[in-house]
Image (cartoon, rainbow, N blue to C red):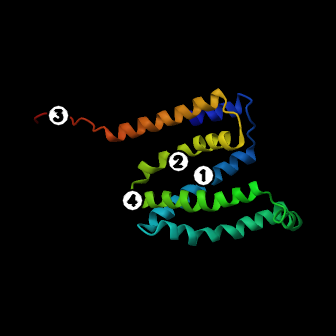
Amino acid sequence: AGVALIGWHGIAGGGGSITALGLVLVMCASASWAGANIVARGAGRINALAFMVWSSPFAVPPLALLALTFDGWPAIAHSIPNASLMAWSTVLWQAIGNTLFGYGVWNWLLARHPASTITPTALLVPVFGMSASAWMLGEPLDAWKLGAAALVMGGLVLNLLASRTPLPLAKRQPA
């Protein structure tokens, strides 16, 4: 319901714009993430940090090619030495916080628990993203965003409680 509220606000509420390209890119990212989860789950109980360290360099060639295609070498050559402290802090956070820690823990959990148990917690990513942007960048948290976050968290709590509550067994009738 929380994700639906975000989508509804983006389409009907005028709070943002959704383009066909943006929607396709989000769908491709979702499929890519699902594929990565399948690979991580198939890897079994391995050192999750080492797995992330060794798999991360494979992202560099396609990302570099995209940067060259869309921005060009002059823009890249200019941006690296002129990047701000905020830009380098963001790169450091993406490399250590998100990639090594976040995906390392995620892969560790996937190796030890069923995907159906772990995957719903991914819905917390936008909640933490909105919270972090409000805290670090001063972005406003409108009432609809807080409502969507509450719906997502409420749904996760219900999911967690439902998975821990044993279902009553049906009584067998004599034949």
Q: Nearer the viewer, mark 1 or mark 4?
A: 4
Of the numbered discs 1 and 3, the one sitting upstream in the chain is 1
* Residue in the picture at 66% in, 67% down: 59
Quadrant containing the N terminus is top right
The residue wearing badge 1 is 30
Q: Amino acid at mark 3?
A: Lys
* Residue in the picture at 71% in, 67% down: 62
Of the numbered discs 2 and 1, the one sitting upstream in the chain is 1
The residue wearing badge 4 is 112
The kind of secondary structure element at disc 4 is helix
Q: Amino acid at mark 2?
A: Ala
Q: Amino acid at mark 1?
A: Ser
The residue wearing badge 3 is 171
Q: Nearer the viewer, mark 3 or mark 4?
A: 4
Gap in angstroms between the C-alphas marked 4 and 2: 16 Å
Kindly check if marks 1 and 4 are in contact, taking CB atoms under 8 A apart as contact.
no
Q: Note whether residue 107 is visible.
A: yes
Q: Which mark is residue 39?
A: none
**Percent from the top left, x then y, of residue 89?**
70, 57
The residue wearing badge 2 is 122
* Residue in the picture at 74% in, 35% down: 16
Question: Is residue 17 rendered to the left or right of residue 155?
Answer: right
- Say which of 53 and 13 sits in front: 53
Question: Is residue 64 rendered to the left or right of residue 33?
Answer: right
